[in-house]
């Protein structure tokens, strides 16, 4: 089955800095890669996703890049704000189910 | 807004008890999922369902069963709770995708933190 590795497990940045979270996947058949954000006491919420026919996607301060050859994808957050502090999960999917990474706790200090 | 509700935020049970976790969604989604979330292990899929009365095993189904008698409701059952089932349980739902069950956004409930003593 699919295996998704996510790094780093924790990331501390100063407000205004950029943050990058990286994931690798094992199944070359995977073609859908969402990112979820989980705030304290809440369930995860989709923030951005990318499909394998696209190399990069942006939504305001958030961007995701995909390298299918190397089987890795990354989340980039620019101009971080304290409200970006949360746990972020990457995931990969082929046909049936999502396989999630273990999560990255992002801490943005004012 | 899509709303996924779970019957309890916190639950404490004894070893050997039968435990029911209920999940209800209000957006007529075909797909529903149960995950458990443990520190350092991320989200792991227990069971999912793509239609009423249909169920499929996820990555860690041992010790669990599920029931989906109505489209909006998906129940997770621990037949005989054990201490290693102490965890956060998350329910999610999504629309059916033409090419598979996972291509659409999953909407998560707030979770049930279950403690088995």
Image (cartoon, rainbow, N blue to C red):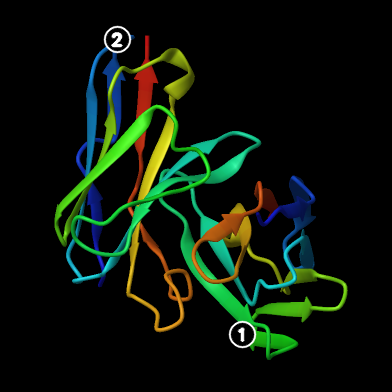
SS assignment at label 1: loop
Residue B33 seen from this side: no
Report the number of numbered marks: 2
Question: What separation in Å lies between label 2 and label 1 (alpha carbons)?
Answer: 48 Å
Residue B43 x/y as whole percent? 54, 46
Residue B65 x/y as whole percent? 31, 36
* Above or below, comparing residue B75 to residue A109 in the picture: above
Any mark on residue B39, and which?
Answer: none
Image quarter where the N terminus of chain B lies is: bottom left
Residue A78 seen from this side: yes
SS assignment at label 2: loop
Residue where numbered disc 1 is placed:
A60
Q: Quadrant of residue B94?
A: bottom left
Residue ID at (60%, 54%): A100
Q: In the displayed structure, does residue A41 sit left or right of residue A38? A: left
* Above or below, comparing residue A7 to residue A92 in the picture: above
Image quarter where the C terminus of chain B lies is: top left
Q: Quadrant of residue A17?
A: bottom right
Residue B70 x/y as whole percent? 12, 57
Furthest residue in direction bottom, as rendered: A53
For label 2, the crowd category at 10 Å Cα-Cα, with few meaning under 14, some 14 to 19 and many 20 or more, is some
Any mark on residue B14, and which?
Answer: 2
Which callout, 2 or 1, points to the residue nearer the camera? 2
Residue ID at (33%, 9%): B15
Depth check, front residue: A93 or A100: A93
Letter of the chain that mark 2 sits on in the rendering? B
Residue A15 x/y as whole percent? 72, 62
Q: Quadrant of residue A29?
A: bottom right
Residue ID at (76%, 71%): A73
Letter of the chain that mark 1 sits on in the rendering? A
């Amino acid at each position: 089955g699919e295996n998704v590795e996510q790094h780093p497990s924790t990331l501390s940045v100063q407000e205004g800095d950029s943050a990058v979270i990286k994931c690798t996947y094992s199944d070359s058949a995977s073609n859908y890669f969402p990112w979820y954000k989980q705030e304290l006491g809440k369930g995860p919420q989709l923030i951005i996703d990318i499909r394998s026919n696209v190399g990069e996607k942006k939504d305001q301060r958030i961007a995701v890049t995909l390298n299918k050859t190397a089987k890795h994808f990354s989340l980039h957050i620019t101009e971080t704000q304290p409200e970006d502090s949360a746990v972020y999960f990457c995931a990969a999917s082929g046909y049936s189910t999502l396989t999630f990474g273990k999560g990255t706790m992002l801490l943005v200090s004012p | 807004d899509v709303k996924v509700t779970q019957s309890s935020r916190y639950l404490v049970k004894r070893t050997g008890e039968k435990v029911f976790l209920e999940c209800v969604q209000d957006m007529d989604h075909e797909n529903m999922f149960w995950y458990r979330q443990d520190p350092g292990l991320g989200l792991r899929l227990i069971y999912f369902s793509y239609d009423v009365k249909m169920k499929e095993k996820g990555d860690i189904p041992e010790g669990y069963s599920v029931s989906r008698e109505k489209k909006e409701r998906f129940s997770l059952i621990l037949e005989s709770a054990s201490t290693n089932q102490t965890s956060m349980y998350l329910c999610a739902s999504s629309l059916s995708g033409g090419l598979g069950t996972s291509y659409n956004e999953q909407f998560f409930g707030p979770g049930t933190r279950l403690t088995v003593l």
